[in-house]
Amino acid sequence: MIAVIDYGMGNIFSIRNALEKVGADVRIIAQPEELNDADGVVIPGVGSFGEAMKQLLPFQEKITSAIETGLPFLGICLGMQILFERSQESPESGFGIIEGEVIRLPDNVLAPQMGWNELNIKRDTNIVKGIEDGDFFYFVHSYHCIPKDKKIVVATTEYGTEVVSIIERDNICAVQFHPEKSGGKGLLLLKNFLKSIKC
Amino acid sequence: MLARRIIPCLDCDLGVPGGRVVKGIEFKQIRYAGIPWELAERYYLDGADEIVFLDITASHERRETMLAVIKKTSKNVFVPLTVGGGIRSIEDARAVFNSGADKVAINTAALKNPNLINQIADRYGSQACVVAIDAKRRYESVDGKEIVKTPDGDCWFECSIYGGRGFTGIDAIAWAEEAEERGAGDIMLTSMDRDGTCDGFDIELTKAVSERVKIPVIASGGCGNPEHILEVFQKTRAQAALAASIFHYGKYKIVDVKRYLKEKGIHVRL
């Protein structure tokens, strides 16, 4: 069972529908205890960093320990950003599971970045199996992640600067775009994530 | 670099069970085109970058039908879904988002209550707020309106409401600027003079608005063939092209249109 955390921000239906489309048994959870029997966890999310951290506070301990024990994790958009230590968007601290920070997109481009943009794949891992350089994914964001350890970067995307669009470290995978809105390639990425789960 | 988007638009008549897709000519004569979620899924599989549903009946009584259509569609369509027609309040918008839509398009309600743009953008983000403008050419000169030169003479563009049945006296170019300032994420710009004619987009209108705002402009109204889409992308800064008739009746497939655009050097997702 894949747990999708509903913390009151953004469209949960899309990610649920997309995961179900690729064969996942999905449960939307709103209580930290419900994570106990999950085989994998997804944090979606659209909205502000500070508000997300406030809403996720009850989950923080549970999620952090689940990730430490090796539970497959997928963060999407804001669900990627909250893994970092801090964000320019809000004073609240992030989970700090990934070293680094989240900063505003440069001034020379329109924020939010909204639309279809290409991946430059830096590292071949299971999450990008079947996905090629130049494939398009759907982005909606005004801030982007700067991981301290560049080795975790799987793909980047050009938008005024080199935006980190996929990171992967052990059982943690996170994407800046919305795979649930990225057509067939997005579904493929979700399918790749499911394959990393033993259930 | 962001790809330019191809967006099929499904005008929905919700007066029958389950709704049906129709297409009018210059906002009038109506022709039947299919079942909303079936057409939406076909377009998604065929490479649409986004799907737009417009409830042309736009009545509160039929709201539940629209929500059911959105729910059913979002189970099989994995690109952004925009819903417009009859959204008058933040509560209407919320119901549409909670059924699985990613963006709402507002027109009449925004002109009557511009603050609705701020409300939706603040609550759901700019990307979720599309301001739709139905613009009509006016050749008689009126003080304070933005005059645009066209091959048919100088004109200004007036915003229409109620699906083309009412007029506001508001200048479409100025309104687009205001919508951007208030937080709109896209301007869906329909030429009332061209809609349903298949004569091509109103290039002068699209150029004027897309050069004035920084947010993406979706060119709409008049698309009759792939060359029209190429023309609007080459001659204006429109980031997206919306079309209905050319896709509905099987004349062109979206993927073929995108291949053609790519051959001509337009950056599209294939």
Image (cartoon, helix red, strand yellow):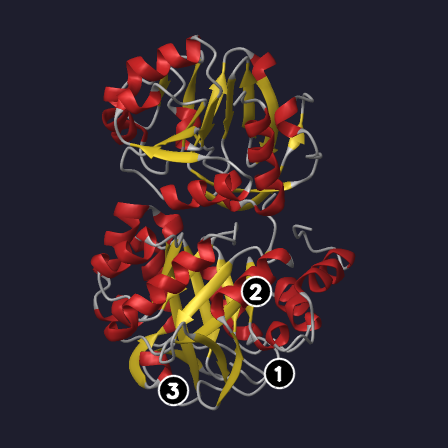
- Considering the image in quadrants, where does the N terminus of chain B appear? top right
Q: Are marks 1 and 2 in contact (CB under 8 Å)?
A: no
Q: Is residue A184 left or right of residue A9?
A: right
Helix, strand or loop at mark 1:
loop
Residue at image point 40% right, 60% down: B70
Mark closer to the chain start, 1 or 2? 1
Kind of residue sitting beneath label 2: Ala
Instruction: Kindly identify which chain the residue marked by label 2 belongs to.
Output: B
The circle drawn on residue B241 is: 2
Near-viewer residue (B176 or A72) = A72
Residue plotted at (24% across, 72% down): B60
Does residue B201 lie above or below A32 as drawn? below
Q: Nearer the viewer, mark 3 or mark 2?
A: 2
Q: Secondary structure at mark 2?
A: strand
Q: Residues within 10 Å of mark 2 (few under 14, many from 20)?
A: many
The CA span between labels 1 and 2 is 14 Å
Query: What amino acid is labelled 3 in the image?
Result: Ser
Q: Which residue is mark 3?
A: B141
* Sequence-wise first label, 3 or 1: 3
Q: Chain of mark 1?
A: B
- The numbered disc on residue B199 is 1
Residue A51, position in %: x, y? 25, 31
Q: Is residue B253 left or right of residue B20?
A: right
Looking at the rendered structure, which numbered label has been put on residue A173?
A: none
Instruction: Please report, as a chain letter, where disc 3 is located.
Output: B
Examine the rendering and report whether any part of residue A96 can be seen: no
